[in-house]
Image (cartoon, rainbow, N blue to C red):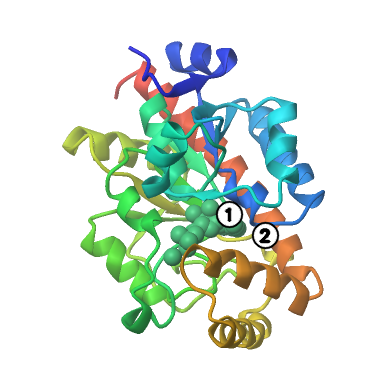
């Protein structure tokens, strides 16, 4: 039975019914991660990348209180062009539904909605995590706790470089979320390939990842997997160059008293200015790379489900 709050686009519903590959995409990256019109161009390019690989894209958002799985062009534009679109995490969903409002879904909210729709793979840029200074502010993204609940694999370029990466990995370990390096041994630092923080599990192929996912969900139907996929070498920004800008952006956020859900969009926007747009170019490149790997994983998973090994 379809969940009463969900609207699944017909193409996606059909693909799910036939157990074909579907890849979820979030909408906070469109509404709050980048300015118009680059955000709309990116949203369409991500969908196109997934189609080119042979899977069906499912961009997720809340519109008029409905949990939308698959957006048409007008809906994408509405998300890309409404400057005060609320940023919706899981805690916000009940209010948006009851009050029939719009919201751009974070990784956490997208995970929950994807799980309700039966989608098993989700590609994003970088997940949220434990913020630097969290020992004082308590700021830890609900992306982490939701990864422990929703049975969905997330392909991500590590976690955003503005975060505390070692503590983010510690928290994922506590939450028992497997973190798999796709052809990498270090947790990628979003804009750059290396962070110096090792990840203990590595996979060489998407077939290997699909086998890990199938095993994960045989053990329990709760909880996801984080697939760490580093930004392509040609597109990366050396960590030494971003670090100085991140420190400046963090200092500014503190001085201005930015807290809560505004922290991540503020830091990303400041970094974009401080790097002269380079951080955004890198963000688009890594998100596309994740969409491609997400589609490959979804296809490998759908093949292994149809022909169980
Ligand atoms: N990655 C990006 N751009 C973004 C985000 C991630 O490249 O805008 C968003 C995601 O939607 C993620 C959210 O879930 O930031 C994390 O916000 P918070 O730290 O408030 O949980
Ligand atoms: Mn937060």
Cβ of mark 1 under 8 Å from ligand 1: the answer is yes
Which residue is located at x 67 percent, y 59 percent?
A: 283
Q: Is residue 144 above or below residue 161?
A: above
Instruction: Identify the disc placed on residue 283.
Output: 2
Looking at this view, name the residue that lies furthest to the front.
Answer: 99
**Marked residue nearer the N-terminal end (1 or 2):** 1
Q: Is residue 191 above or below residue 201?
A: below
Decide: few, some or many residues near mark 2? Use Cα within 10 Å; few <14, some 14-19, many ≥20. many
Q: CA distance from mark 1 to mark 2?
A: 7 Å
Q: Camera-side residue: 70 or 258?
A: 258
User: Residue 1 placed where, x, y %?
Assistant: 32, 12
Q: Camera-side residue: 164 or 80?
A: 80
Residue pointed to by mark 1: 125
Could you say which quadrant of the image residue 27 lies in?
A: top right
Could you say which quadrant of the image residue 45 lies in?
A: top right
Helix, strand or loop under label 1? loop
Q: Is residue 274 visible?
A: yes
């Amino acid at each position: 039975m379809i969940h009463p709050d969900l609207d699944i686009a017909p193409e996606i519903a059909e693909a799910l019914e036939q157990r074909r590959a579907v890849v979820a995409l979030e909408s906070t990256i469109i509404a709050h991660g980048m300015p118009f019109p680059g955000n709309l161009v990116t949203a369409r390019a991500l969908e196109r990348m997934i189609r080119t690989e042979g899977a069906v894209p499912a961009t997720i958002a809340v519109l008029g209180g409905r949990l939308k799985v698959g957006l048409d062009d007008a809906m994408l534009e509405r998300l890309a062009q409404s400057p005060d679109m609320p940023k919706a995490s899981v805690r916000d969903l009940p209010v948006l539904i009851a009050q029939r409002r719009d919201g751009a879904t974070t990784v956490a909210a997208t995970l929950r909605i994807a799980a309700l729709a039966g989608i098993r793979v989700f590609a994003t840029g970088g997940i949220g995590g434990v913020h630097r200074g969290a020992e004082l502010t308590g700021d830890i993204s609900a992306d982490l706790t939701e990864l422990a609940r929703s049975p969905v694999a997330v392909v991500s370029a590590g976690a955003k470089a503005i975060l505390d990466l070692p503590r983010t990995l510690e928290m994922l370990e506590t939450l028992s979320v497997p973190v798999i390096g796709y052809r990498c041994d270090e947790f990628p630092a979003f804009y750059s390939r290396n962070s110096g923080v090792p990840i203990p599990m590595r996979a060489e192929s998407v077939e290997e990842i699909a086998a890990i996912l199938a095993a994960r969900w045989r053990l329990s139907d709760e909880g996801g997997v984080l697939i760490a996929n580093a930004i392509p070498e040609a597109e990366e920004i050396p960590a030494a160059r971003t670090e100085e800008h991140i420190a400046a952006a963090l200092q500014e956020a503190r001085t201005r008293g930015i807290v809560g859900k505004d922290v991540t969009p503020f830091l990303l926007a400041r970094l974009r200015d401080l790097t002269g747009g380079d951080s955004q170019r890198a963000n688009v490149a890594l998100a596309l790379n994740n969409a491609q790997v997400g589609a490959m994983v979804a296809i490998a998973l759908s093949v292994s489900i149809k022909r169980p090994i």
